[in-house]
Image: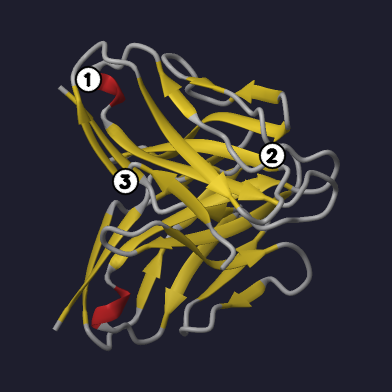
Amino acid sequence: AQSVTQLDSQVPVFEEAPVELRCNYSSSVSVYLFWYVQYPNQGLQLLLKYLSGSTLVESINGFEAEFNKSQTSFHLRKPSVHISDTAEYFCAVSRAGGTSYGKLTFGQGTILTVHP
Amino acid sequence: EAQVTQNPRYLITVTGKKLTVTCSQNMNHEYMSWYRQDPGLGLRQIYYSMNVEVTDKGDVPEGYKVSRKEKRNFPLILESPSPNQTSLYFCASSLYLGPTYNEQFFGPGTRLTVL
């Protein structure tokens, strides 16, 4: 079984400041790692994913996350946030390879609020 | 447009009144799943289905039923809703199960309030 812990429930930040949303996971098997974003009153959108290969993955809107196997972490970062980044962010894992049932295990969510 | 649709989007009901939340996808996906989202708990899987007539429990199945009679539809049934089922519900689907990754696509969500 997998578990995910997002270390901050809320992160307030000023516009153009850097931000890091922290995510740690636990699993006895190899996993895929994901960050989803949920804008106010909307559904979930996949922001970025780590499947294999380079441990640093990037999204089209400037976010990046780094898979750290030794620390079992997958923190999300952005060097300069915008008001439009205000949303709730979810870290998630799923079992990698084998016969996967596709189940995503989510963290508790981190509400990022960007202030002008 | 490829999408997962859910109906209704908002529902207020009373304890004990049976209800169904529909989920439909137009991507010919085999795998479908229901999650509920609660503050501070993230999303938790209720039920999933690997194909027509194949369903199984997720982490929080109590109080829910599902069926998969057609590939495109995966309704969530609450036979006797209770206030602790007040939540935001998401349906998701992905192409097929196997050793390689397939992205899950989420519906827009259904906000359910049980009084």
- Whether marks 3 and 2 lie on the same chain: yes
Q: Secondary structure at mark 1?
A: helix
Distance CA(mark 1)–CA(mark 2):
31 Å
Q: What residue would you read off at disc 2?
A: B71
What amino acid does circle 1 point to? Pro
Dot 3 or dot 2, earlier in sequence: 3
The chain under label 2 reads: B
Q: What residue would you read off at disc 3?
A: B9
Q: Is residue B82 above or below residue B42?
A: above
Q: Residue at x 45, y 74 (%)?
A: A77
What amino acid does circle 2 point to? Lys
Whether the residues at callouts 1 and 3 have beta carbons within 8 Å, the answer is no
Q: Quadrant of the C terminus of chain A?
A: bottom left
Q: Position of residue B75 (x, y in %)?
A: 51, 31
Q: Secondary structure at mark 3?
A: loop
Pair 1/3: label in front: 3
Q: Is residue A19 above or below residue B70?
A: below
The crowd level at tag 2 (other Cα within 10 Å; few <14, some 14-19, many 20+) is: many
- Whether marks 1 and 3 lie on the same chain: yes
Q: Position of residue A54 (x, y in %)?
A: 74, 74
Distance CA(mark 3)–CA(mark 2):
22 Å
Q: Residue at x 66, y 58 (%)?
A: B103
The crowd level at tag 3 (other Cα within 10 Å; few <14, some 14-19, many 20+) is: some
Q: Secondary structure at mark 2?
A: loop
What amino acid does circle 3 point to? Arg
Dot 1 or dot 2, earlier in sequence: 2
Q: What residue would you read off at disc 1?
A: B83
Q: Position of residue B58 (x, y in %)?
A: 57, 26
